[in-house]
Amino acid sequence: MRILVAGNGGREHALLWKLRRDAPEASFFATRPNGGMAGACEAVDFAPGDPRLASWAAAAKIDLAVVGPEAPLADGLADRLGELGVPVFGPTAAAARIESSKAFAKRLMARAGVPTAAFEVHEDLAAAKACIDAMQPPVVVKASGLASGKGVSVCPTAGEAVTAARHALEGGFGEAGKQVVIEECLEGEELSVFFLAGGDGVLPLLPSQDHKRAGEGDRGPNTGGMGAYAPVGFATEELLEEVERTVATPVLAAMAEAGCPFSGLLYAGLMITSEGPKVVEFNCRFGDPETQAVLPLLSSSLLEPMLAVARGDGVAGVRLEFRDAAAVCTVLAARGYPGAYGKGDPVSIPALPGETFVFHAGTVLGPEGLATSGGRVLAATAVAPTFEGARAASRTAAEAIDFDGKQFRRDIGWRESRRRQPAGTRLGRNGAGPESPLPHKENAK
Ligand code: GLY
């Protein structure tokens, strides 16, 4: 079997790692693999968005192409692969609009009765202003298109909301901001749920929670994600059934009805509110860094359902099994991230105790060894029988890995940790000092 992974971040390293475990005998290929993927696959020297990648895959007789990032999916990579007869795990460009057009996704949810924040879509600043006034801040202003995770502003005041809408509508995010979605601000706790979707139903993976802010205590600027953990204590089986019934199933049915059936990985980004789960966003691909926490807990094959989806066989006959354990993933970023950061610093990864996996993102393997090449450099995922064990081991690994300018959060999973402490003994986010609860009110990437 010949398997191509398109993409070269931490998520794609985790996908490659899991698929290699599922099929050790297979040949693996990846587009411009990072320093950790390089030794585990053959390099294909095309970016995932390069139109030549599909013809390469057809000529190379690829049996399964797995597309990691959203941008090439939105650009039609899955369509091109499909047209050339390459089985692909990932949605068509039309179906990827569930992520690449927030206006499309919100209207679809409204039609399908999927719970989500009240919203309006605007292309004109005067109308956007009127909507902001009527909605009464706090509100969330979102560029409708893909804006590299930067297009969402949580705005406590009308002035900030108007500034955010003006910035988007006047070209701050290029074409991606020509339409804005203005929506009410949801209050609650966030949850990420992945569904493998194959046309005949869905297979949910373990729920996870990520940490989007750069600073400890969920403060500071938004990032691509500074860590994640799975499973999540409050995500009971009943809650997951509710999410499948009220979110995944109706939205997928609405997509099929709209003529753009979705196949691949549907990521439901949820806010668990006092009224139940509401959708903050959908993504058309695995989450990063949640994937780095979820896949190490998947004990059954990922390859089997991916092939079933890619071949159009559906997922009805497939069962997923997960380990009875916890995984905590700490992201190590370069100094300055999410702003400007340096590159080319040597990276040293010592032997790590226990079950710890290091997934690479912004690394490159050169003649001089491993060096940094991106903002998020590595993710250290620890798996342990207990949540606290996984949390401590992930932090220990993050401390032991070395590169100049390394920054990471020491409080990944602090909400879960607090939940698990008996009432009256609750400690701070780093396990010391009194906890200062922060409201979690930010339906923003
Ligand atoms: N972790 C958020 C995302 O993948 O979009």
Image: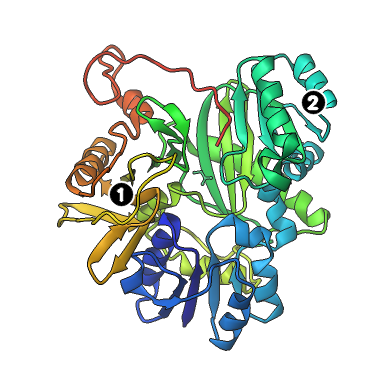
Residue 264, quarter of the rendered image: bottom right
For disc 1, the neighbor class at 10 Å (few under 14, some 14 to 19, many from 20) is: many
Looking at the image, residue 361 sits to the left or right of residue 440; the answer is left
Q: Residue at x 57, y 46 (%)?
A: 148
For this rendering, which residue is in front, 326 or 184? Answer: 184
Q: CB of residue at label 2: within 8 Å of ligand 1?
A: no
Q: Which callout, 2 or 1, points at the residue further toward the start of the chain?
A: 2
Q: Which residue is mark 2?
A: 128
Q: Which mark is residue 307?
A: none
- At which x and y percent is residue 229? 38, 41
Q: Compared to 183, does 376 lie above or below? A: below
Q: Compared to 60, does 334 lie above or below? A: above
Q: Residue at x 51, y 32 (%)?
A: 190
Helix, strand or loop for disc 1: strand
Looking at the image, residue 324 sits to the left or right of residue 261; the answer is left
Looking at the image, residue 333 sits to the left or right of residue 134; the answer is left
Q: Which residue is mark 1?
A: 381
- Amino acid bearing label 1: Thr
